Image (cartoon, rainbow, N blue to C red):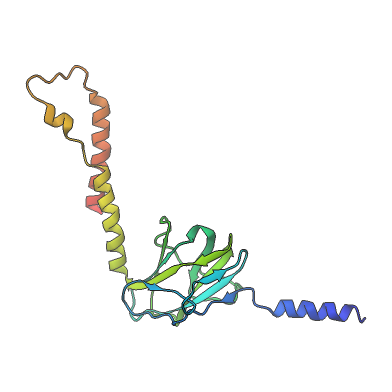
Amino acid sequence: MRRILPLILFSIFLGGCAAYKELSPKPELSPAERGYIELKDNDENFKLDKDGKYFIRFPKPERDQFTIVLRLNSKSALRYYLTDKFDDGKGDINRMKDEASGQDTISAYFVSTSVPEYFWVIDSVISDVNLAMTYRYMPQWRFTFENKYAEYKQILEDNTVERTTYNSIDNDFSFSDFPFSQELSRVQARTKKVRAMKEE
């Protein structure tokens, strides 16, 4: 019995420990609309241990139709999500959609004033991480515009046609070796992308 009692107490102790460690940034997080703010533990970055589990509380925005944007150096080394309810990983979890899931360094989540706070939950740390991270609250329309502007600019750059051949056409130009079908396919593909951008 004396041997079993310490094992029982140890099991109770482990069962009572939280699976997730709360990170408390200093200074406290602010929902005010402004530029990117560093998320720090006083003057230092948070150190995340491999296989660790963490969470950070984000306050609700000041108005509806806002976005929490996270810019971080180690997106690929973390498995995380934002949720509006969190009980140490228990029960049903509403993993909110990352509006910037295709980007390497940014995550963004549309939030509202309907809940008192949000939780950024790190489920898994692939390797030790020195978390260099900034956050920003901004209206959804601004986030959409800023992201789409960069996307549209890239579409235009990718589909700009080289005019050398066109400019070289004169009375002496020979069309006998000109690859009409290939060029027509390229023009149609470019036109389709630019028209889709225009419609959007």
Residue 200 x, y percent position in the rendering: 26, 54
Quarter of the rendering containing residue 184: top left
Q: Residue furthest left?
A: 171
Query: In the drawing, does residue 169 fall left or right of residue 24?
Result: left
Residue at 25% in and 52% down: 153
Image vertical order of residue 75 relative to residue 164, above or below: below
Q: Residue furthest front?
A: 43
Residue drawn at 57 percent across, 72 percent down: 54
- In this rendering, is residue 104 above or below 135? above
Is residue 193 in view from this perspective? no
**Toward the viewer: 41 or 146?**
41
Whether residue 174 sits left or right of residue 124 in the image: it is left
Quarter of the image where one finds residue 189: top left
Q: Report the quarter where the N terminus lies.
A: bottom right
Image quarter of residue 34: bottom left
Q: Position of residue 40 (x, y in %)?
A: 46, 75
Residue 107 can be seen, yes or no: yes
Residue at position x 41%, y 70% from top?
134
Residue 157: percent from left, percent from top: 25, 46
| Numbered marks: total | 0
Left or right relative to 161: residue 68: right
Question: Where in the figure is residue 144, as x and y percent of width and height?
Answer: 30, 63
Judged from this view, the residue extending furthest toward the top is 176
Query: What residue sits 61% from the left and 68% below the top?
Result: 52
